[in-house]
Amino acid sequence: MFIATLIAKESLNERDIQSAISSLAATDAAIIRQSEIVDGRVVDIFFDGDPVAARDHLEQIGNEIDIAVQPEANRLKKLLISDMDSTMITIECIDELADYAGIKPQIAEITERAMQGELDFEEALRGRVALLKGLDTAAIKQCLDERVKIMPGAEILVRTMTQRGAPTILVSGGFTRFAKPVAQAIGFESFYANVLGVEGGVLTGGLDGPIVDSTRKVELLESAADGAKLPLEQCIAVGDGANDIPMLERAGLGIAYHAKPKAAQAADVAIKYNDLKALLYIQGLASDQWVTE
């Protein structure tokens, strides 16, 4: 059996639910039952049928409603792994850091193309970092203080999963100097990111150590799952760019969050309208089960 979860940005009404049921019927799905409306904006519809066709049809109902279609089994995940930039925080750190060097437009264009999957990730990363050579490291703290904002719902998502015993891992193609304070602020158990080269208080324009790219993100997912003795089916991954796609595809539930088109297409679920608390609704957790402090 499968579950189709409807998550409205504002409020869900019976007309929306009936539209969803009609959409499922058009795929020859057999409706088993539906839940009550949760928190005024979420409903689960249980059905037997083709989940891919169900998602395709349900995503046409509009009305700023996010759709998640997944198997009923292993709905409540036991491990969370997430990208950072534009996923757990609202910005791309390298773009904002470049602003302090006076070259944001030049770097932001490369970032966008890399996230769209148009450029090799490592080559694009090294090229952008090289352009930051000579930037005073004081700009990093300034950027953290002035620009880095936690994505709405991030803390509630991570803290709720942590309370339930789920390992939480932040994996970033960005930099440890941002990932460490972000992970601590949100409550992630561990973090992995790239190390900026620094000498004499300025950036060298290089990177130290191995690159956290799409392959490394998958390796970290598999290693974390193995360490927790969990099958990948019980893991949830979230990201927004092309370098997140292998991780999203490998996890039991891959969620593209306000993502680039290629990532949204590759993921099991694409969240377009709601914040990160949607990931809790998708797992069947209503607001009275969230950790809010």
Image (cartoon, rainbow, N blue to C red):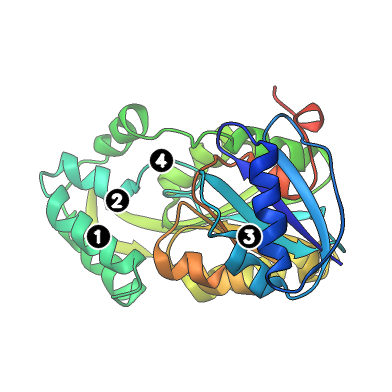
> Quarter-wise, where is residue 117 in the image?
bottom left
| Label 1 secondary element | helix
The number of callouts visible is 4
* Crowding at mark 2 (Cα within 10 Å: few <14, some 14-19, many 20+): many
Residue 237, label in figure: 3
Mark earlier in primary sequence (1, 4): 4
> Quarter-wise, where is residue 126 in the image?
bottom left
Mark earlier in primary sequence (1, 2): 2
Give how far apart the Cα atoms at labels 4 and 2 are. 12 Å
- Picture coordinates of residue 146, whole percent (x, y): 31, 28
Mark earlier in primary sequence (3, 4): 4
Give how far apart the Cα atoms at labels 1 and 4 are. 20 Å
Image point (71%, 71%), residue name: 51
Image point (87%, 64%), residue name: 73
Give the labeled residue for mark 4.
90
> Compared to 155, does 60 lie above or below?
below
* Crowding at mark 1 (Cα within 10 Å: few <14, some 14-19, many 20+): some
Q: Nearer the viewer, mark 1 or mark 2?
A: 2
Mark earlier in primary sequence (1, 3): 1
Give how far apart the Cα atoms at labels 3 and 4 are. 18 Å
Q: Is residue 191 left or right of residue 96?
A: right
Circles 1 and 3: CB atoms closer than 8 Å: no
Image point (55%, 75%), residue name: 246
| Label 3 secondary element | strand
Give how far apart the Cα atoms at labels 1 and 3 are. 27 Å
Residue located farthest toward the top when viewing the structure as drawn = 293
> Compared to 116, does 62 lie above or below?
above
Circles 1 and 4: CB atoms closer than 8 Å: no
| Label 4 secondary element | loop
- Picture coordinates of residue 239, whole percent (x, y): 52, 58
Report the front residue among 177 and 68.
Answer: 68
Give how far apart the Cα atoms at labels 1 and 2 are. 8 Å
